[in-house]
Amino acid sequence: MTSPAPAPHDAYAALRVPQYRDYLIGSSLALFGRQAVLAAVTWQVYEWTRSAAALGLVGAVNVLPLLALSLPAGALADRHDRRRLIAAGTAVLVLANGLLALLSATAEALPAWAPLAWGNAVLRTIAGWFELAGDPAQLRFDQPALPLMFLLLLGHATVRILVWPARASITPLLVPTPALGNAITWNASSFEIATIAGPALGGLLIAAGGTTAVYILGTITEILFLVAIARVRYFHPPTPSPGRRSWREMLAGAEFIWNRKVILGASSLDLFAVLLGGTTALLPIFAAQILEVGPAGFGWLRAAPSIGAIAMALWLAHRPPLARPGRALLWSVAGFGLATILFGWSRSLWLSLIALALTGALDNVSVVVRQSLVQLLTPDALRGRVTAVNQIFIGSSNEIGALRAGLMSAAVGPVAAVVWGGVGTVLVAAAIARGVPQLRQLPPLHTLRS
């Protein structure tokens, strides 16, 4: 007697659930706009200052709320209605993006008030501590709008951090359990696409209409997300977090990850790999000084990883789950490091675009596997706090990576900063592969349960 044929893989199982589909579309649009806004801020700060260290300070402003607020944000997500938290934070970001658009449009007419001049002096002093490779005579910290830009960026980052654990842990409540793995794949893939394609469009809009147009786009996408949240209904009721409020409760996510070596290894891999191998913060310098392709070239450089990420995301969604996801994760991170080295060495726009496309494709594999592990192996009552700790790993790798890239570029030059960062990424992948053997032995993701 022959066994029945296995059921065909449904690549769109989660997308057939209306509440998840509405949320995914709105969330992706918002992420798309947020990443475009951050790209515009990066370009505008460099335009105003011509300082690599100032780009590092943009990373620092983003990472300070991450380190200070992620754990309390995780506890908020586990104790309160995640939909309401997301809606409140999104409304604040609508206002913040509107203020960025107003500031960008009126920057040249802004009077040189004394507090703004003092703010510029502080920024110049901090940047001067690290600006070893640049020409101090070319640095410009005289734009009155610059300190206000950093204040708005700090507020923007604070709201994003407070809301992110609720956003990242709501997906299991929106779909039936059999479709959760598919939802995680679409969630991770759409996140990766928005994270990379958003800045790409931001760069193209900067070339076409200036930074103000990007901030207006960000305002519109946040409003669309508010509309989507209003339509969302839970498929599963959330599980309330037990126990009284305490530091032990807030740190429960960290304790859970520490005891799950597979999640710890995957998160550590992403932390150090992106911290060392990230090139995003230095793309304005490569576009302006090394490849000499200007704002339009900057847009294409930001677009290249999105091409690779979109291609990989579609491939992952339409194929059966990875049979050996741990090994796929390790090899993708090592390949990410090698592609980063290739980008650093390249003096050809086309070769640079290929290298960046490879980083996007390989990073997408890493994102899908890591987020799947966190969501599948974590009970709902802990999801907000575990997500918050994972956010510290991932967010700090991006933001501290931007700080590392900017400061290292100021000290030894952008090419060396990129190449040595890629080498470090390869070494980290090798170290994690040896130090966490459970990751190499990980079974298919669809077999995992919390």
Image (cartoon, helix red, strand yellow):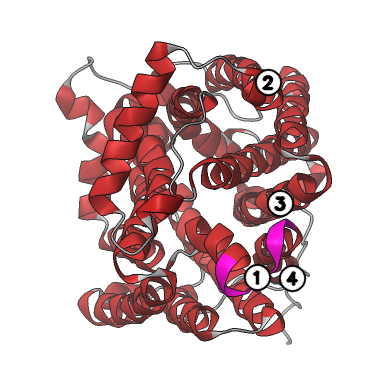
Q: Which span of residues is magenta-colored?
A: 289-295
Q: Earlier in the sequence, mark 2 or mark 1?
A: 2
Which quarter of the figure has residue 33? Answer: top right
Neighbour tally class for label 2: few under 14, some 14-19, many 20 plus, Cα within 10 Å: few
Q: Residue at x 27, y 50 (%)?
A: 257
Q: Which mark is residue 135?
A: none
The residue carrying mark 4 is: 311
Q: Earlier in the sequence, mark 3 or mark 2?
A: 2
Residue type, label 4: Ala
Can you identify the residue that label 3 sits on?
203
Label 3: element kind: helix
Q: Earlier in the sequence, mark 2 or mark 4?
A: 2
Q: CA distance from mark 4 to mark 1?
A: 28 Å
Residue appearing at x 52%, y 81% in the figure: 339
Label 1 residue SS: loop
**Label 2 vs label 1: CA separation?**
29 Å
Label 4 packing within 10 angstroms: few (<14), some (14-19), many (20+): some
Residue 292: numbered disc: 1
Percent position (x, y) of residue 161?
Answer: 44, 31
Point out the tag, 4 or 1, that comes first from the N-terminus.
1
User: Picture quarter containing residue 265?
Assistant: bottom left
Give the answer, above or below, for where 93 lies relative to 173: above
Left or right: where does residue 443 sit relative to residue 269?
Answer: right
The amino acid type of the residue labelled 2 equals Thr
Q: Work out whether residue 113 can be spotted.
A: yes
Task: Say which residue label 2 marks.
Answer: 106
Q: Quadrant of residue 358?
A: bottom right
At mark 2, the secondary structure is helix
